[in-house]
Image: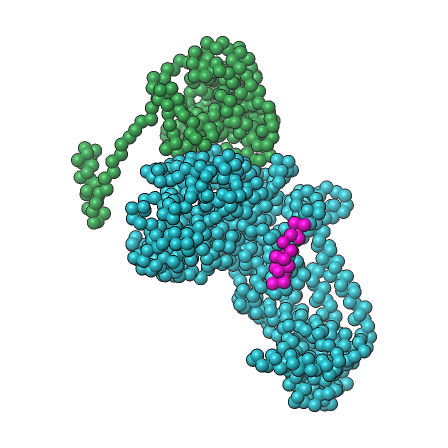
Chain colours: A cyan, B green
Amino acid sequence: MTKSAVKSDSDKRRTGATSTGKRVSALAIPAWLPLGGILLVSGAETVRVTGAHRELFFNIDHFWVLYMLLPFVIGIILYGLVRRSRVWRLGQPIVSGQITRESLRSAFDDLPVRLGRLVKGGGGTERVLRDPYSGVMHLCIMSSMIVLFLVTALLAIDDYIPVEILVGPRYLGYSLVADIFGLVGIIGVAMAVAHRWVRPRTAWLPTWEDWLILGGLGMLLITGFIVEGLRIHTSEIDVNPEWSYWSPVGYVVALMFSGVKISAALDIHTTFWWIHMIGALSWISLLGYSKLNHLVLAPANAFLKRTSAPGKLDMIENIEQQEHFGVSQLEHFSMKQLFELDVCVRCGRCTDNCPADIAGQPLSPMHIIQDLKSYATAVGERKVANLVQGHDLNFGLDDEAPMVGGVVRDESLWACRTCGACVEACPVFIEHVPTIVDMRRSLVMEEARMPDTVQGTLETLERQGHPWRGTPYTRDSWMEGIEDQVPEWTGEQDYLYFVGCTGAFVDRAQEITRSVVSLLREADVSFGVIKGMESCNGDPARRLGHEYLYQILAEGLIELFNETGVNDEQKTVITHCPHCFNTFLNEYPDMGAKFQVIHHTQLLEQLVDAGRLVPRGDGPEQTITYHDSCYLGRHNDIFEAPRRILEQVPNVTLIEMPRNREQGLCCGAGGGNMWMEEQGKSRVNEVRVEEAVATGAESACTACPFCVQMFDSGIGTVQLDVEDDDKLKVLDVAELLQAAAVSEGQSDA
Amino acid sequence: MDVIVCVKQIPDPETPAAAFKVDEQAMQVLPAQGISPVISPFDAQAVEAALRIKDASGEGSVNIISLGPDSARDAIKHSLAMGADEGYHLKDDAFDGGDAWTTALALSKAIQHLGVPDVLIFGRQAADWDQGTVGSIVAELLDLPSATVLRAVELSDGGITVSRVVADGFENIDLPTPCVLTISNEFGDPRYPQLRQIMQAARKQVTELTAADLGLDASEVGSAGARVQMHSLFQPTSDVEVEIIEGDTPEEKAAGLVNALREAKIL
């Protein structure tokens, strides 16, 4: 459509409004207004249509039955939703304790963000559209339903107001739009059916629900056209044939019925009209009883989703006073978590994006949500009944399989990388990760049931304050030989460089630590290191489900930061570990942290921009692919800083892997999996290394010491038969920048 | 079935070698910075064995005794968190500087003080000094039958059936009760305490007993009563030289290795 066409459209519309003296704002549906306007105008100019219109209840007696049924249908829908809400209300109030004004406020904080998400993600189906096929399919069905609903409503309104809107050219435009969107709906349904029939995703298989909803909708659209065709056949085609061209689909149907006698056609028309109308009311009733409820629940969930950083886990307040730790029963979930289960439409995108599932490991986020949903239906309803009858909540439920370990298997919970790919992919804004970690919390703290490797990691954290069991190193091993080049933190410097456990205890990561120190010295940054006294900030314990140990470790570190003057709004903590970064930035404020946090890639980018680090131009030509760390990228939205550093190193060509930025694939180490044995067909790091190798890049660059290790070990197996010189090289961004920007004499530190 | 387990707190065996230091003058191991002492791993397995015996018999108690400084209380608390019932801490300056004999003597008095249970369990050895004698000495002092270095313990009619780890296999033995058992690492991993139990254990009182409470004179225990004298304590240094045998083919490398071993008079 050209600009001038749009202009003439709006101009004419204004003219039309003046001449009839009636506003057409009721037609203001963005999706079809321009189209309708154009057609309306051209229709007015080319055809004699002055009297075109149609009767509301043509050929129908007792139509009042319909109006009688309407409140009944609304009642049925509301009954279904309210009944379901009793299961949601088994959950914990939004903030532990009771529903207070504060807890309500926490569900409505950051209102602009929530409203924006409601409009874009709910109404605008922003995330649905990311998948081209199902995005188009969904858009077809959704736009068709909205338009056809409004079309029907408009016809009724038109009939009951004294002035006629739908007459003449406006009626003809209206007819055309209705027909087009009816057809669009059929296309959408056909795509949905094909999707399920021809290429069902491996993650799911359609159920009766899918076929009922799609079959019902298809039936409605087809009977709608049959009714229209019969009306045209019996009342329009012979009298005002030029009107019927404006209902092209109805016109074709009318031609198909042309051999049928008018009296018989009128009878068929009545029958189909009632089938169509009763069918429509029955179909919409599914809204209270099936995944069709996403019409209402999905936008609601877009609004209700937390506004905190996606990688943040919520704290268990007053943990020593809790009656249970984590979630082992439905009622331990929050209301929001139980509500979310019903929002799921089984689209499978979470599972399609899950690194564990991609590697053939025993985790499908969609099945966790779906299995919990079934459990909430079966057992939740009985718990509700127990409440109503004044029984104990779990009366008569002793024989049910346990929720954690039965409905959701332990190995699924352990396979989660907390990478957030599922949360990012979910078109209806479900947050799988906190739900999974809540159940891990119960496994670890309530039942003490976990893989040996997890137990060993937690014990090492408890005893030694770091997760690296069996390391031959101490906190300060990395600075051996360069002690005098590593400034001790005095409380006077601007930045504390928090080395973290991996940077200190793992030899490969020690190289990264030394690179960072070297760059900070080169750029003359005012920084220091707390020598010998650092301890883990608790992130591994928290991700592994041991919230209590996390809180103990975090309290200890905050105390150290208080004593050494780090915990000050004027001080900034640098970390090269995205996991430390996420915990400090998003979770430590709950523990009383006031300091600022910066990831080394952010700081290095600033230093390069400011000219304090100058990459030399004599470096080797190299192609590099950048791998996004989940906790830096997806969880904290830092995608560009590391890339901009790479782009500023001369002779570096950056190549992207197909899965990058928000869609980046985890290296496999997240969620404590760094310290676990993987179970399943293949390893996540091998899948990711294969993707990196496939780009043809010589090196993979990342900004996380875990990713570096996972890549190194993945290359060991993926490129087993490749000559060492031709193997993919793995570097932290800091190492690459150090090679390019630090002069030779400096490069030891 | 009533069980008593004797546990010892030791420096964490996972302490990295670089952090392990001794004071040669004082002949003492210096605690590593930031690394808390732990219950000896064999002793944690002994507690696990005791808890399984209690569970299998369906009744009785598991009580813990530890001799050591203030911090030894944490090893008792850990055992309580695993599920043991009561803890007894033998704490007295008079115990300082003791050896296996004085420790066994104090423990045997404490056991008599509490009443000899059906089963007494120890770890096969404390993972710091690795002497492995306290359990056997206690058995002698109390005149009880004993079986050491066990990989399995089961209840049988009127007694206990155990499986010992020996050089060329396993030895299955029936013992009457009361008896003394020492548990080896082959027994399996000890349980990880549930958080609720950790919190309950933190609130539980540990009974402290002194030498006087046990009817022991200060001259019988600690350095005064010790029968073993330490002459020196040092960290051995070892110089390792690495020589990479070069060669284009595996055959050449193997030949080079054989020559090098001959030169070193190893072959």
Image quarter of the N terminus of chain A: bottom right
Q: In this view, does A264 lie above or below A478?
A: below
The residue depicted at 57 percent of the width and 62 percent of the height is: A127
Q: Main secondary structure of the magenta part?
A: helix
The residue depicted at 61 percent of the width and 52 percent of the height is: A306
Instruction: Evaluate whether residue B45 shows in this view.
Output: yes
Is B100 situated left or right of B113 in this image? left
- Does A526 lie within the magenta span? no
Q: Where is residue A613 in the image (x, y as percent from the top left)?
A: 37, 52
**Magenta highlight range:** A105-120
Q: Position of residue B110 (x, y in %)?
A: 53, 16
The number of callouts visible is 0
The residue depicted at 30 percent of the width and 52 percent of the height is: A724
Q: Where is residue B184 in the image (x, y as percent from the top left)?
A: 44, 29
Is A646 situated left or right of B109 in this image? left
Q: In this view, does A161 lie above or below A679?
A: below
Q: In this view, does A235 lie above or below A415?
A: below
Instruction: Evaluate whether residue A553 shows in this view.
Output: no
Q: Nearer the viewer, residue A157 or A734?
A: A734
The residue depicted at 59 percent of the width and 81 percent of the height is: A5
Quarter of the figure with residue A112: bottom right
Is B212 situated left or right of A733 in this image? right
Image quarter of the C terminus of chain A: top left
- Does A118 lie within the magenta span? yes
Q: Where is residue B258 in the image (x, y as percent from the top left)?
A: 20, 39
Q: Which of A339 and A446 is in front in this view?
A: A339
